[in-house]
Amino acid sequence: MPLPILLVDDDALYREVLTADLEDRGVAVTAFADGPNLLAALAGDIEAELVLVDWTLPYLSGPDLLRALRRGGCQLPVAFLTGRSGVEHLAEAQAAGAVDFIDKSCDIDELVQRLRRIAGR
């Protein structure tokens, strides 16, 4: 059974390539270009086991999106997938309640392993 995730990244090409790579490895991806579109989708009937969020997004930053998710009652685990490394970003992600902080240069197979671990699979 595929692992259903929600992906939020504003880079259309990266989002498309990552979605294809993840789906090739048994991950069912529903992708969004920004936080407001994700929040609107969550108001409907959408199934997922976790949310993978870019740090730098239009309208709502990744950390702001995570806080909005929690205020809205969404309890899905949230992991950041970002090109921003650094202790200060990691600390902010953890303070906001993220379960993982993954560098975008991470190997796709490692990423899938981490997603499965987060989902308890």
Image: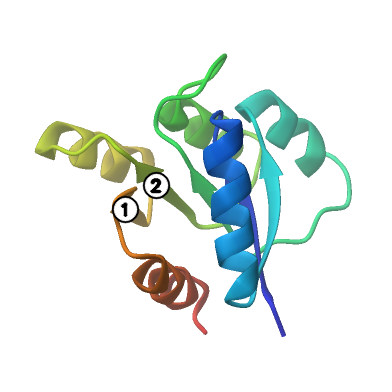
The disc at residue 102 is 1
Q: Is residue 110 shown above or below 72?
A: below
* Foreground of the two, 90 or 20: 20
Residue 3 x/y as whole percent = 64, 73
- Report the amino acid beneath label 2: Leu
**Residue placed at 13% from the left, 37% from the top?**
86
Q: Residue 62: name its quadrant.
A: top left
**Residue placed at 47% from the left, 25% from the top?**
64
Real-space Cα distance between discs 1 and 2? 5 Å
| Secondary element type, mark 1 | strand
Residue 28 x/y as whole percent = 70, 66
Name the residue that disc number 2 marks.
81
* Foreground of the two, 74 or 44: 44
- Report the amino acid beneath label 1: Ile
Say which quadrant the N terminus sits in. bottom right
Q: State how many labels appear.
A: 2
Q: Is residue 81 shown above or below 56?
A: below
Q: Earlier in the sequence, mark 1 or mark 2?
A: 2
Q: Is residue 51 left or right of residue 85?
A: right
Q: Is residue 88 left or right of residue 45?
A: left
Q: Residue 108: name its quadrant.
A: bottom left
